[in-house]
Image (spheres, helix red, strand yellow):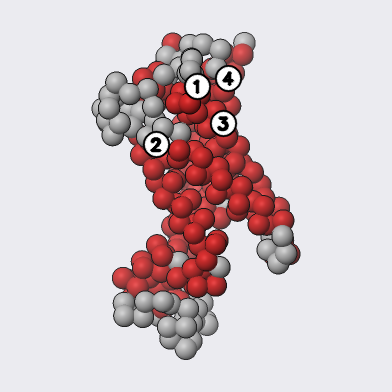
Amino acid sequence: MTDKIWYVVMVPMVYLAFAWSIIWIAIKIVGILRAPKLPATLRIFPEGLDCEDTSTTGLSGAIWDAFTMPSVRKYKPLLWAFLVIFHVAVVALILAHLDLLPQINIMPAQSEHMLGNGAVGVIITVSLLYLLFRRFRSPVREVSIPADYLLLVLLLAIAVSGDIISWGNSWTDSGFVMTKKDFGLYLESLFKFDFADPRQFLSGSHYSVIGAHVLLVNLLLIYLPFSKIMHVFFAVPLNKLRRG
């Protein structure tokens, strides 16, 4: 019975969560594109007050602002440092998961370790703890809403459950009972839409840890279109409006 529940979580629910997320992200973007134009400008005056690099304008300047966050660096350098580290680590984490596929070998094919040997998980977990605890302090606490804490707690739960898997593989003598190759076969079966039971790839007593990790990721995908993560899609356009 338990394996049947995990099968639903790790196969059909994954597809449904991705479909839900993609459809709602598209609805949100189309809704904003079709919304009436704001009567007031979002441009910041005097020009350059909130932009470190005023030599670039238009789209290139907006992209520069989105990736370097100059106003955050100027007024809150510690927060800026954690944000940069966190975003770079997330990119590394995405590459690490793609590297699980047999066709991609960023790490040597025979390696049992994910990209970063567990260090990426440490960076993300520490960054999330900082971002969460800063919301308990004034003045950030006064402008925080329950959704801010919910998102950070969910991300932290995903990170910790992933850490257990990654650290178990890289940092213990006996290792995790499932290998990088096993995870790759499960991921490949998802990409092929063959609806195979993950149990045939992921045998062992740690199966529930993988299931819990996938369940949390599914919940994040379902919540993502309504969360602040949507800033990924709107950061450049908003900075373009700010620069004029």
Residue at figure coordinates x 39%, y 27% from the top left:
113
Q: Quadrant of residue 90?
A: top left
Three-letter amino acid code of the residue under disc 4: Ser
Residue at figure coordinates x 57%, y 23% from the top left:
209
Per the image, the residue denoted by label 1 is 172
Q: Secondary structure at mark 3?
A: helix
Q: Indicate which disc, 1 or 2, sits on the residue closer to the N terminus.
A: 2
Q: Secondary structure at mark 2?
A: loop
- The residues tagged by marks 3 and 4 sit, at their Cα atoms, a distance apart of 11 Å
Per the image, the residue denoted by label 3 is 161
Q: Nearer the viewer, mark 4 or mark 1?
A: 1
- The residues tagged by marks 4 and 2 sit, at their Cα atoms, a distance apart of 24 Å
Three-letter amino acid code of the residue under disc 2: Gly
Q: Which mark is residue 116?
A: 2
Tell me residue 207's x, y (percent). 54, 17
Q: Quadrant of residue 241?
A: bottom left
Q: Residues within 10 Å of mark 4 (few under 14, many from 20)?
A: few
Q: Which mark is residue 29?
A: none
Of 196 and 19, which appears nearest the observer? Answer: 196
Report if residue 61 is visible in the image. yes
In the image, 227: left or right of 59? right
Per the image, the residue denoted by label 4 is 208
